Image: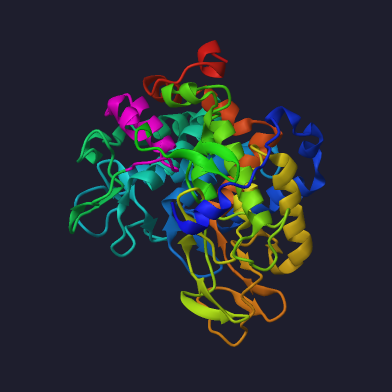
Amino acid sequence: MGVLAAQVACAPARVPPSSASPASLRDEPFLDTLQSRTFDWFWRLGNAQNGLIFDRWPTPSFSSVAAVGFGLTAYPIGVERGYITRARAAERARTTLDFFWRAPQGPQPSRVTGHRGFFYHFLDMETGHRFQTVELSTIDTALLLAGALACREYFDGPDTVETAIRDLADSIYFRVDWKWAQVRAPQVSMGWRPEEGFIAYDWRGYNEAMILLILALGSPTHPIEPAAWDAWTQTYTWSTFQGQAMVQFAPLFGHQYSHVWIDFRGIQDRYMRERGIDYFENSRRATYSHRTYALANPLRWRGYGADIWGLTAADGPIDTTMSVSGVERRFFTYAARGASSGEIRDDGTIAPTAAGGSVPFAPEIAIPALKAMRRSYSGALFTEYGFLDSFNPTFTFASVKVRHGRVDPVHGWYDTDHLGIDQGPILAMVENYRSELIWRLMRKNPYIRRGLERAGFTGGWLTSGQ
């Protein structure tokens, strides 16, 4: 444990039960505005010819396979909220899935989209081919598949378009050779490059890869064995941070991504049964610990408080050390910022998606935080497409050239980009809080259910068959 983490880990904090969250927050008009604007980012900016979604915008960028998965998840929400017709959403979903099914796969280093059913992390927005020398990414493939399976469950009509969506989602999922990615079984590798083979790291510890393992366990064609889940949980770190006993992971995105699609309320694997909570409660505690950390503000960053909090993977102003009021401060550009018992990476940069992706866990603190960010920073942070990626009130050096964004000498640094992997959790998790739409869809999915059962989950909706 780092010295700073040890210093801030002991602050007591009481987390009220999730049942204490006021249901009235579901009707907040602000949430209507936030969802509609965030949805428009996917719908208006996505490539309607192939379904690809920008990694970021307006900075010119490639497509992020994970962002495509979040886009697919967004389309049913758009229909249910009345933003688009079911027919238009179905056509976009079919176009996307048809592209990924037909896109070239193979071991060659270029002019392909994937290999062994997996997809490269980033793709050219027009051709859909591998962008430069990025890795074949197991986690980004999993996020794409989760979105595809959400569409599989939502578009359940008998017409040719919706039938094609279901068939394509199955075919894309069935093709993924999960066993091939177990180069150091039972763990699953993080990725592969044709130039050098498998990445030297496997998915270990608690993080965003729960959805990956559940999908790999549930595969009807190339499933991994349940030993993989046992190996995964054996690498967890259970300890206390900011008064909260929980499985640790410093950035909040690791406590959010899998929960976009899987309703972990009331279901437990062996690890959580032994500790008397579920993964939903674990994420709730993580959310509160981040807010309490911001209140403590041990590094004395400007702006932190009860409604300005949340550390996660995000852009930042610059990679350098600078003097702020006589104190040397380390700043980062894109980094996985976070706070836990074992790690503090905090340069004063706050990402709205940290609170937005936590809305179902703790709406009573997450929604006021989002509203405060919009109110305090107005058009500099909240645009026609919802929240920009991040902001840093401490970084007021207007004469310094920053990699992304702009610097206001009074209010600090603001990003100028929206990121797909931010937009997706905000939109979907707000919807899960308001209507449980994505959770309800995925509770019906036979592959998710099989994966959870093979991982040893029991209880709640999984046992009752709801």
Nearer to us in this view, 103 or 239: 239
Any magenta on residue 357? no
Nearer to us in this view, 30 or 412: 412
Residue sticking out furthest to the bottom: 399
Counting the numbered discs, the total is 0
Rendered position, 11 above or below 263: below
Q: Quadrant of the C terminus?
A: top right
Question: Image check: 437 left or right of 226?
Answer: right
Rendered position, 128 above or below 187: below
Question: Image check: 248 left or right of 389?
Answer: left
Relative image position of residue 204 (x, y in whole percent): 34, 41
Residue shown at the point (79%, 61%) measured from the top left: 375
Can residue 309 be seen at all in this image of the molecule? no
Residue shown at the point (54%, 73%) measured from the top left: 317
Relative image position of residue 387 (x, y in whole percent): 66, 59
Any magenta on residue 207? yes
Relative image position of residue 260 (x, y in whole percent): 55, 38
Can residue 52 be seen at all in this image of the molecule? yes
Residue shown at the point (40%, 47%) measured from the top left: 140
Rendered position, 364 above or below 42: above
Residue sticking out furthest to the top: 464
Q: What stretch is highlighted in magenta?
A: 203-232
Relative image position of residue 81 (x, y in whole percent): 71, 39
Rendered position, 214 above or below 402: above
Q: Which colour scheme is used?
A: rainbow
Nearer to us in this view, 247 or 129: 247
